[in-house]
Image (cartoon, rainbow, N blue to C red):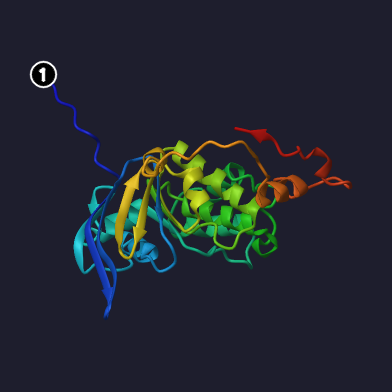
Amino acid sequence: MTTTHAPEPAIRVQGIEKSFKELQVLRGVDFDVARGSIFALLGSNGAGKTTLVRILSTLLKADAGTATVHGFDVAAKAGDVRESISLTGQFAAVDEVLTGRENLVLVAKLRHLKNPGAIADELLARFSLTDAGGRRSATYSGGMRRRLDIAMSLIGNPPVIFLDEPTTGLDPQARIEVWQTVKQLAQGGTTVLLTTQYLDEAEQLADRIAILHKGTIIQNGTLAELKQLLPAATVEYVEKQPTLEEVFLTLVGETGETGETGAAADAQPARKEF
């Protein structure tokens, strides 16, 4: 009789604690992230999300507990962890003096990869930035700059990527662009740990969601599992009103391009539904 073992998680966190002087930020955090999945760490400002990401990416040492990334202990095998990950912070880290292509070529050269130009061209195509590749990144929109930032993070094909609040400060269209990019990463087999304070972002992207509150994980599960924590709502006959985001995207179009008369004529009236 043969026994099958579950594959080792891409990220395993057990009992992680971290304090800054008298301030205890992490109070014993535990969770696993399956390979090739999107795991959302949801929490308000100050919950400890960025601190945890810094520990997992070897930029900060935990006071207690253990963590492994891609099978490597973050404390004992920091070098191996760094070779296995990429970290994208809250603000795009692109050089605005360089063109989009030059940014990508620079990172490929820094990683000592062969054919940096070909790598840059492939990523520009993958992230729909080929036409903008010869322009200085200072001229890019927020969504384009963030997509370029994520593309730079993927040079070298890291199996694990950390996205720390990747849509902070972006407009609705740019957020959708980034969401599509993140989904493509997971479809390609990349493990994504996403930190966010936006509830809809976690709902749109994550295979599993962990809620970090006051330094501990208070719930961890799929979206369906989390929804079961609350009783079913009473069904009433209501007129569904469009959200402000739906109005905005209808008026300007998801790409921000509209005709002279706008897209308001295409807008659908509110529907009545049960």
Quarter location, residue 42: bottom left
Q: Tell me how many marks there are.
A: 1
**Residue farthest to the bottom, as pictured:** 21
Which residue was labeled with disc 1? 1
Vertically, is 151 above or below 75? above
Residue drawn where x is 38% and y is 62% of the image = 49
Closer to the camera in the image, 111 or 247: 247
Q: Quadrant of residue 13?
A: bottom left
Q: Nearer the viewer, residue 33 or 211?
A: 211
In-image side of 234 versus 241 (left or right):
left
Locate the N terminus by quadrant: top left
Q: Nearer the viewer, residue 19 or 198?
A: 198
Q: Residue furthest top?
A: 1
Q: Which residue shows up at 40% across the image and 38% down it?
A: 224
Residue at the extreme left of the image, as rendered: 1
Q: For the C terminus, which image quadrant?
A: top right
Q: Amino acid at mark 1?
A: Met
Say whether residue 196 is visible. yes
Q: Is residue 76 visible?
A: no
The x, y position of residue 144, in whole percent, is: 63, 54
Q: Could you tell me which residue is drawn at 70 percent across and 58 percent down? A: 135
Is residue 262 toward the left or the right of residue 228 in the image?
right
Does residue 122 lie above or below 172 as drawn?
above
Along the line of sight, which residue is nearer the eye, 46 or 53?
46
- Give the residue drawn at x 47%, y 40%: 233
Percent position of residue 30, x then y: 25, 54
Q: Position of residue 54 (x, y in %)?
A: 35, 64
SS assignment at label 1: loop
Q: Residue 249: give x, y in percent of width and height.
A: 71, 47
- Label 1 neighbour load within 10 Å: few <14, some 14-19, many 20+: few
